[in-house]
Image (cartoon, helix red, strand yellow):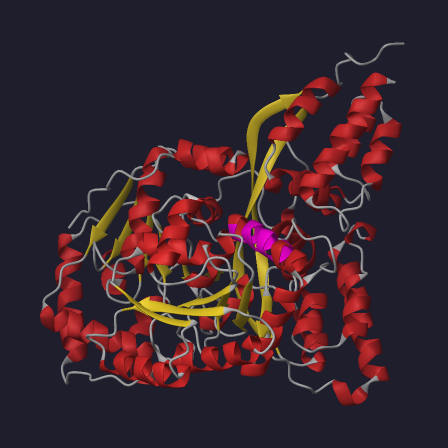
Amino acid sequence: MDTTLNSAEEPFRFVTASYVTRINNQKVTTLDELRTGLDQASDASIFYHTFHTLGRHHFLTEGFSNDFAQWVLTGLNRPALAEALGSVDVRDYVALAELRGDLRRLVTDYCGEHPRETEISAFEPLYFCESVEVAVPLGREAGTLEEFADALPTLSHASLHYHFIASRLRLQLGTNDFSRWLAQSLGREDLARRFDRLDIYTNTLDTLRQKMQTLIHWELNT
Amino acid sequence: MIVESRTAQSLDRYEELLGPEVEELRALARPLSGRGILMVNSTAVGGGVAELLSGIVPILEELALPARWEVIAGGRDFFEVTKAFHNALHGGPSQMPGDAFDIFRAYTERNRAATRLDSEFVVIHDPQPMGLIDGRANGAGHWIWRCHIDLSHANPAVWEFLEPWVVRYDGAIFSSPEFSRRLPIPQYLFYPSIDPLSEKNRPLDPLYVKSILEGFGIDPSRPVLTQISRFDRLKDPVGVVRAYRIVKRYFDCQLVLAGGGADDDPEGSAVLEETAHEAHGDPDIHLLELPPSSPREVNALQRGSTIIIQKSLREGFGLTVTEALWKKKPVVASAVGGIPSQVIHKHTGLLAHSVEGTAYQIRYLLSHPELAARLGQQGHEHVREQFLITANVKRYLTLFLHLSGRGSGVELSAVNPPS
């Protein structure tokens, strides 16, 4: 059955998100303070330094995962802990509390194994900040896969990040807006799964977009 | 006094450069359509804030937002006081007139009476006009204080005088987390920005770049290391010469130190002399005193350089770093002030903490041009995302939407599926 022109049950409504950064009155200079800081930081702060930083640095692919890992590497020169923090994959989390808990556990374990390093001062402090998110509809919709494919190249990085990365927290389903729509409204479960397997750490948002376009092209031509 | 917006770059021209990011500005502006914005500062020309507002206000107008820019009035006595405040807030020495606080209060009252303050969003820039919040009618509108200076070492007496005004705002904006203070109101981070279409940043014909370099006696066929800065000890030009000397043992390179004229700055002249002394007449070291306004020459020097250095001992935000990154140049810089926000070590440039470290990072980049090119490209993307005038406008729009509760999404604790 040719389903390429099938209409979705619900159109995909494109949204863009914009953020302002709120400065918390909280800065840390040692691993011990980082451990406490992770305990005390708000959820919006954990989001800022993990999910949001992926959007702010969407053009980086090698060795940049989150602000905590980057600071531990460049501010404290502790590559083993940086690697451990950097390997935390935000896709594994549907709630910020779990993410915070794992980050804190990694720092606590490292401090336990290296007690002399807990009080070493960093070259520069880490300032905890928070994301304040405002989401605004772009006024565009896609009712078919073809319309979705046409819209994809024209989306801003912020919109891609909102739908493909930040949405995992919003949906709390371990998936993203695009995959959910492809599966639920178009019935294209395989394509949805392929979208969801795209690696947000080893791709830039632009290369992710290109891979999505390729996947859609295959879907429409096979 | 209302400042008439000069004709700025049309949003269409930014769209050619930035693509869908501009559509996003339009989407963010839509829910704010028709709602008044007032920007107030203390000067219409000269200085970074005036330059910033002369770019931002026309963009807001083009987005169908009724934006006004007002400049407060003040006599010589007022500006002597605010200059002293400025120095004191930076933590430096200041000559404060005995009646400074009375003078400040008197002008604040005069300006309050003369300024229309009924816009929904009021942004007050820096300390000079901050007392205008006395004219806020019964908590009406949304008032933000935009502080462009570093308050981390503020003189306690001046801060205690100003703080009662600050805490009445709905929020304060700082250029870096380390410039902020512990305050009972929300604090926001807005990076300073550059205009990619300005004389200092727009693309240049490579032949023009070459001609400028050759005009200064620089050989474009050999590596050029450049620091653009005032001749100021905090920019450590002597340290830059020392780093260059180490690099020179390995690479046949040239050094350019270019900055504003030192004629009317006794300390600048002394620093220039010290730097020339350190250069020992090396013909490959070019100390260039540029006229106060030489944006095209600075642009050409940056574009014609192999590596840009910013070896400051202390720094504000460091917009010369931003300019270099925008031009896709590999940057080696000190980890001070706002520089680490821009130079993410090994991703958008290299950070150093000493003369020897600076020299090593330069040598590393000269040995690995492919890495230098990658850092330059990623630095460009970083600026595009964070430090352009359009990103600044976007932050204002987002903050206004957040303050007024418009927009379908709010803070993360209340996230909702897309409508």
Q: Nearer the viewer, residue B149 or A94?
A: B149
x%, y% of residue B345?
Answer: 63, 66
Q: Is A130 colored magenta in this rendering? A: no
x%, y% of residue B274?
Answer: 34, 85
Image side of residue B199 versus residue B80, left or right: right
Image side of residue B44 versus residue A179, left or right: left
Q: Is residue A91 above or below residue A39?
A: above
Q: Nearer the viewer, residue B28 or A146?
A: A146
**What's the residue at 14%, 66% (across, down)?**
B107
x%, y% of residue A92?
Answer: 83, 52
User: Is residue B280 in view?
Assistant: yes
Image side of residue A169 versus residue B106, left or right: right
Q: Nearer the viewer, residue B258 or B21?
A: B258
Quarter of the image where one finds residue A47: bottom right
Q: Is residue A165 above or below residue A183?
A: below
Q: Is residue B398 above or below residue A10?
A: below
Image side of residue B300 versus residue B75, left or right: right
> Magenta region's main secondary structure?
helix
Q: Residue furthest bottom?
A: A116
Quarter of the image where one finds residue B295: bottom left
**Magenta-tinted stretch:** B374-383
Quadrant location of the C terminus of chain B? Answer: top right
x%, y% of residue A29?
Answer: 63, 80
Q: Nearer the viewer, residue B391 or B325?
A: B325
User: Is residue B138 in view?
Assistant: no
Q: Is residue B253 above or below residue B323?
A: below
State how many labels appear.
0
